[in-house]
Image (cartoon, rainbow, N blue to C red):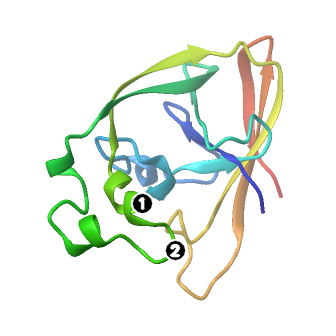
């Protein structure tokens, strides 16, 4: 297992996948880890960061966050808020929902090299609960420019 990063592909049709699969999959807060049309990679920094392939380039998405007032947090007003938990302690529940994303900026990485990225067929809605398998792609960047994206067999 281990850490990984998220990759989102914008404005580029991926070979063998219906482009409609990716429409409307992101929520307003861009919680990419919980959305089905997002890929993972171990070829970058592996810190659960978010990267975007768009306009023929690779960008790192840097999120701007703000603190959420206590009364708007997940467990505020619930027993867990004051009682805490056996494993993580009281502060765990008070910190849940502490920050929210209010914006982002995309930083061009001028990336040179190949990146493998993948998702399970189930996450992409291409398999039922009992089926298994992965969809994997390789993207090649030359001096920052996307040369191609190809499926990996």
Q: Which mark is residue 51?
A: none
In the picture, measured across the screen, residue 72 lies left or right of residue 10, that is left
Residue 44 to residue 42: above or below: above
Q: Position of residue 34 (x, y in %)?
A: 45, 58
Decide if residue 19 is in sight here. Answer: no
- Residue at image point 35% right, 62% down: 93
Q: Are marks 1 and 2 in contact (CB under 8 Å)?
A: yes
Q: Position of residue 66 (x, y in %)?
A: 31, 30
What is the number of callouts on the image? 2
Q: Position of residue 153 (x, y in %)?
A: 83, 58
Q: Badge 2 local density, few (<14 within 10 Å), some, or many (20+)?
A: few
Q: Mark 1 vs mark 2: which is more N-terminal?
A: 2
Residue at 32% x, 51% y is: 97
Which of these two is toward me, 13 or 116? 116
Q: Nearer the viewer, residue 28 or 113?
A: 28
119 horizontally vs 37: left or right: right
For residue 88, above or below residue 56: below
Query: What residue did someone put label 1 on?
Result: 92
Q: Categorize mark 1 by other alpha carbons within 10 Å: few (<14), some (14-19), many (20+).
A: some
Q: Give the residue number, with chain letter if any, for mark 2.
A: 87
Of the 4 image quadrants, the one containing the N terminus is bottom right
């Amino acid at each position: 297992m281990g850490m990984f990063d998220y990759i989102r592909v914008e404005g580029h049709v991926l070979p063998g996948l219906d482009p409609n699969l990716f429409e409307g999959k992101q929520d307003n807060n861009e919680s990419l880890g919980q959305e089905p049309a997002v890929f993972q990679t171990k070829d970058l920094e592996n810190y659960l960061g978010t990267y975007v392939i768009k306009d023929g380039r690779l960008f790192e998405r840097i999120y701007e966050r703000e603190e959420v007032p206590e009364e708007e947090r997940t467990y505020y007003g619930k027993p867990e808020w004051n009682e805490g938990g056996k494993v993580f302690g009281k502060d765990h529940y008070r910190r849940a929902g502490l920050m929210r994303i209010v914006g982002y900026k995309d930083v061009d990485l001028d990336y040179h090299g190949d990146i493998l990225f993948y998702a399970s067929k189930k996450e992409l809605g291409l398999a039922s609960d009992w089926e298994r398998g992965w969809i994997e792609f390789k993207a090649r960047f030359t001096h920052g420019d996307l040369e191609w994206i190809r499926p990996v067999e």
